[in-house]
Image (cartoon, helix red, strand yellow):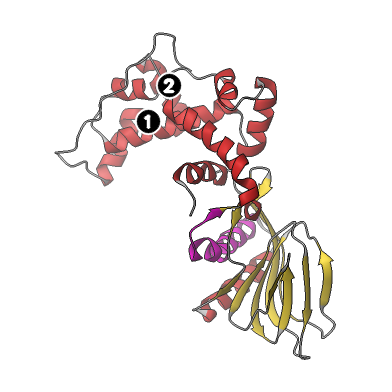
């Protein structure tokens, strides 16, 4: 099972998730359907309606059956063919789903073949996917992403998520970055400090960080400060000054301007809007603020 620190790092990666549907169809494949030792740069999904076939992923063989959903991860050696002269009738699609610089399924391990209990629902999802993909509009692109995410989520919900063994060192480094920032949000943070925590040169670190998280390091810190402030505004009765302190700001005015820019509302307005819909219990405990440094805040 994925460890808590790995989960947090992966969650940050998923905030920059980029999903693209390349093609989607329903096909009755020919008896000659097959391929040997190909390594596609995209993921494939097959939802089997009828027929028999064989798929090899790496060194493992699978025989997907009607009612099963099968995933072929990107950048993985794959072979496949029909068997018993009963070629597949299947819904299928090709897609990419990037988490940082890698495809999501290069980070995590999931079962490749799922039994789908509600075949009718899955059929409808693929039909929607095909219909939206055939349309040329901004709305269609948004809709197809939504449907594809719902289909892909079946693999993420089926078992506890695991970071692939050959990615654990990389995920560990990302976890250290995430923990370093989270534990110091009440202080001033600069790129040199974060780079030192993972033993990288600051210049290389900035490039490395943006490649994985999709944004520069200090933009990430700002996002984390905003998240911390939102959490405190909506779950505690701390004053704006105390929240500013925990979010890393010595001056309340500076914090208010920062928060308005990031969240679209002033802190008091954000708290009021949230409390109107989710009143805080009268007995809610006030979290004490961390002590602050005297060296200023970002």
- Check residue 136 for magenta coloring: no
Q: Residue at x 75, y 56 (%)?
A: 75
How dense is the environment of label 1, judged by Cα within 10 Å: few (below 14), some, or many (20 and up)? many
How dense is the environment of label 2, judged by Cα within 10 Å: few (below 14), some, or many (20 and up)? some
Q: Mark 2 points at which residue?
A: 257
Main SS of the magenta segment? helix
Tag nearer the camera, 1 or 2: 1
**Left or right placement of residue 82 versus residue 185 in this view:** right
Report which quarter residue 130 is drawn in. bottom right
Farthest bottom residue? 85
**Left or right placement of residue 137 versus residue 7 in this view:** right
Report which quarter residue 216 is drawn in. top right
x and y, in percent, of residue 145 in the image: 60, 58
Q: Residue at x 37, y 30 (%)?
A: 229
x and y, in percent, of residue 150 in the image: 54, 63
**Image height of 18 relative to 181, above or below:** below
Q: Mark 1 points at which residue?
A: 229
Write the start and end of the magenta stretch as one range.
Answer: 138-162
* Foreground pick, 12 / 113: 113
* Foreground pick, 198 / 225: 198
Residue 184 visible at all? yes
**Image height of 263 relative to 35, above or below:** above
Q: Residue at x 45, y 23 (%)?
A: 258
**Mark before the other along the chain sequence, 1 or 2:** 1
Report which quarter residue 59 is drawn in. bottom right
């Amino acid at each position: 099972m994925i460890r808590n620190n790995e989960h947090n790092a992966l969650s940050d990666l998923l905030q920059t998730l980029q999903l693209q549907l390349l093609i989607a169809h329903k096909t009755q494949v020919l008896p000659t359907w097959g391929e040997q030792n190909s390594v596609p740069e995209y993921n494939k999904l097959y939802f089997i309606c009828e027929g028999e076939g064989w798929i090899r992923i790496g060194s493992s063989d699978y025989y997907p059956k009607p009612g099963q959903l099968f995933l072929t991860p990107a950048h993985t050696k794959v072979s496949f063919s029909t068997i018993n002269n009963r070629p597949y009738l299947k819904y299928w699609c090709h897609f990419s789903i990037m988490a940082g610089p890698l495809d999501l399924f290069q980070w995590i391990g999931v079962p490749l073949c799922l039994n789908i209990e509600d075949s009718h629902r899955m059929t409808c999802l693929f039909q929607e996917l095909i219909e939206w993909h055939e349309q040329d509009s901004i709305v269609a692109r948004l809709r197809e992403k939504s449907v594809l995410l719902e289909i892909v989520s079946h693999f993420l919900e089926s078992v506890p998520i695991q970071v692939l063994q050959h990615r654990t060192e990389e995920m560990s480094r990302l976890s250290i970055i995430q923990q370093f920032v989270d534990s110091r949000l009440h202080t001033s943070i600069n790129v040199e400090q974060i780079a030192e925590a993972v033993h990288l040169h600051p210049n290389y670190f900035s490039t490395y960080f943006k490649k994985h998280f999709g944004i520069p390091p200090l933009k990430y810190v700002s996002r984390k400060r905003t998240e911390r402030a939102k959490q405190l505004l909506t779950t505690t009765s701390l004053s704006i000054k105390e929240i500013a302190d925990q979010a890393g700001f010595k001056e309340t005015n500076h914090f208010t301007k920062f928060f308005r820019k990031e969240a679209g509302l002033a802190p008091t307005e954000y708290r009021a809007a949230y409390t109107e819909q989710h009143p805080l219990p009268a007995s809610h405990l006030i979290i004490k603020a961390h002590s602050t440094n005297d060296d200023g805040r970002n």
